Image (cartoon, rainbow, N blue to C red):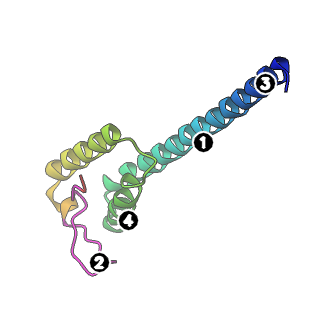
Amino acid sequence: MPAQAWITLIVGVLAVVGVMATVSQRTRADNRAQSWQRITWCLERTVSDNDEESELGWEVFGTVASTPFIAKTDRRTLWTIADHIANRSPDLAETTDTSDNETKTGTEDPR
């Protein structure tokens, strides 16, 4: 195989790898943006005067905040926000989730 063919092959492979990396990065960014939209929705619900809406906000918050799409530093930020909200309003911390047969508070930290 002549040198020009090898160079063309290498450039082609590098182009494919570059496109794959770009698509992967874009997918991760889109997933993180979607997660933040869900988290915003949850946090808006957690401070609601309606107890059922607040409980739903905490339950969904715990699920969304533990998704793999969120960076560790972002996750720490989320739990700090949750701790702040729960400490400001003690009745919000009483929200429980018994889906896995354990009692959990909405501010439990999975770090």
Residue linked to disc 4 = 56
Q: Is 19 placed left or right of 76 in the picture?
A: right
| Disc 1 to disc 4, C-alpha distance | 28 Å
- Could you tell me the amino acid type at mark 1? Thr
Q: Is residue 55 above or below residue 111?
A: below
Report the mark closest to the observer, 1 or 2: 1
Q: Earlier in the sequence, mark 1 or mark 4?
A: 1
| Disc 1 to disc 2, C-alpha distance | 33 Å
Residue linked to disc 2 = 98
Is residue 102 shown in magenta?
A: yes
**Residue farthest to the top, as pictured:** 4
Count of numbered circles on the image? 4
Q: Earlier in the sequence, mark 3 or mark 2?
A: 3
Residue linked to disc 1 = 27
Residue linked to disc 3 = 6
Q: Is residue 40 above or below residue 51?
A: above
Range of the magenta residues? 94-109
Q: Secondary structure at mark 3?
A: helix
Out of 96 and 70, give the one closest to the viewer: 70
**Quadrant of the image for the N terminus?**
top right
Q: Earlier in the sequence, mark 3 or mark 4?
A: 3
Report the mark closest to the observer, 2 or 4: 2
Report the mark closest to the observer, 1 or 4: 1
Q: Earlier in the sequence, mark 3 or mark 1?
A: 3
Percent coordinates x, y for residue 73 in the rendering: 31, 37
